[in-house]
Amino acid sequence: MYNILYQYILLNRQLGLPGIGTIRLVQNSAQLDIANKKFLAPYQHFILDHSIDKPADKLFDWLSHTLKIENWDAIKKVNEFSANLKNSITQSGDVCWEKIGVLHRDEKGAIVLDTDRSNLQNRDSVAAHKIIRQKQEHSILVGESEKSSLEMEELLSIKPLHINYAWRAAILITILSAGLIGWQFSSKKITLSSLGNQVVMQVK
């Protein structure tokens, strides 16, 4: 019955056992192991849900079809299997269900399942290396036109202004010279008429 019910769990992802609970097949997604720099592969494991211990009707139909027995006999087999499993856990302390895990009682007396991951995790982990690509060109939609990333870098880059200090120096010298000349005119009271020839020429 162990192998037959194991096949049923794989097909339907859950199995209800009277007096024990429902064994469910749960899918876990891939996880990132930052310390070891790798992705852990997704895996499946079994859990035991104590809230529901009623078998589904399709379990009896499936057993009846698989074992070629009447539906009533299928119900009887499931009940006997659950009772024997519960008694074995009580007497021996734990029961190993191959490919599913170990059933035993905890300190409170409740039946718990320690699942066997090794049989269901058959995919290797994948190395997680950070890849940095420098200056990789790709297309960018700008408005209604398409431009490359390199073109956008050139358009958005701020070019430093080239300052011509020679022109600044020439303008500054010109201003200072004009100021100095003006100061000379005002301090010595020089007029424009005094700059000309003051000799009077007499015409005969």
Image (cartoon, rainbow, N blue to C red):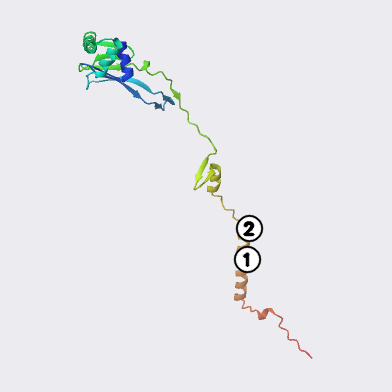
Q: Where, by quadrant of the figure, is residue 192 drawn?
A: bottom right
- In percent of width and height, residue 125 lies at 43, 22
Say what secondary structure mark 1 lies in: helix
Q: Amino acid at mark 2?
A: Ala
Which residue lies most toward the bottom here? 204
Q: Is residue 97 visible?
A: no
The answer to which of 111 and 189 lies nearer the viewer is 111
- In percent of width and height, residue 165 lies at 61, 57
The alpha-carbon separation of the residues under discs 2 and 1 comes to 12 Å
Give the label on residue 174, or none.
1
The answer to which of 166 and 27 lies nearer the viewer is 27
Q: Residue at x 63, y 71 (%)?
A: 181
Q: Residue at x 66, y 81 (%)?
A: 193
Q: Residue at x 30, y 12 (%)?
A: 66
Which quadrant does the N terminus fall into?
Answer: top left
Q: Is residue 186 shown above or below 121?
A: below
Q: Is residue 57 visible?
A: yes
Q: Is residue 32 left or right of residue 108?
A: right
Which quadrant does the C terminus fall into?
Answer: bottom right
- For the image shown, how many numbered marks are present on the structure? 2
Dot 2 or dot 1, earlier in sequence: 2
Give the label on residue 166, or none.
2
Q: Residue at x 63, y 58 (%)?
A: 166
